Amino acid sequence: MFDELGYLVRRNLIEEQIADNYLSYDIEKASCNVTVQDVLQQERMDDKRKTAQSDPFFGDFEKLPKTFLETDGLACNDLDSPTALAAKKKKAGARR
């Protein structure tokens, strides 16, 4: 689902700010999950397509949380800190 959302954002069919406001925490948590990272790595190793390097599986998904984390100045370890959660809530409320 998040890869499809990333595709829609990349194609400018959904504004990045809307995805950030409503789903950034969920997207960031999913991308920071060790199991998800392992699955993505395995998918990439198994990918034999000619376009595997230029258009990797789940590439659109990986771009969203990277952008959101960089914008917020956060890392995966910061996501559940009270300070980060409060800042994300305040930021989302200010944009609406």
Image (cartoon, rainbow, N blue to C red):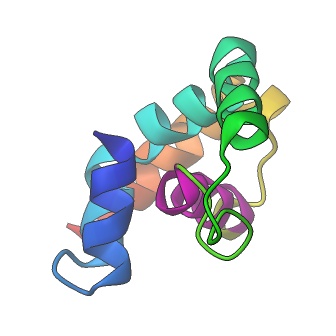
* 2 shown above or below 80: below
Q: Position of residue 57 (x, y in %)?
A: 55, 51
> Does residue 93 lie above or below 47 as drawn?
below
Quadrant (top left/top right/bottom left/bottom right) for the C terminus: bottom left
Q: Which residues are magenta?
A: 58-70
Horizontal side, residue 56 vs residue 86: left or right? right
* Residue 52: quadrant of the picture: bottom right
Q: Residue at x 48, y 62 (%)?
A: 60
- Residue shown at 49% from the left, 52% from the top: 61
Residue 82 placement, left or right of 14: right
Q: Position of residue 73 (x, y in %)?
A: 77, 60
Residue under the image location 75 percent in, 16 percent down: 34
Q: Taken as a whole, is the magenta stretch helix, strand or loop? A: helix
Q: Which of the 4 image quadrants contains residue 41?
A: top right
In this orientation, which residue lies closer to the viewer: 94 or 42?
Answer: 42
Residue 94 at x, y percent in the picture:
33, 66
Judge whether residue 65 is colored magenta.
yes
Q: Residue 80 at what x, y percent from top left?
A: 66, 21
Q: Foreground residue, 64 or 87?
A: 64
For residue 95, say whether it is visible.
no
Task: Give whichever of 59, 34 is nearer the camera.
Answer: 59
Identify the image quadrant of the N terminus.
top left
- In the depicted view, which residue is nearer to us: 24 or 46? 46
Residue appearing at x 60%, y 53% in the figure: 62
Q: Is residue 51 visible?
A: yes
Q: Is residue 54 magenta?
A: no
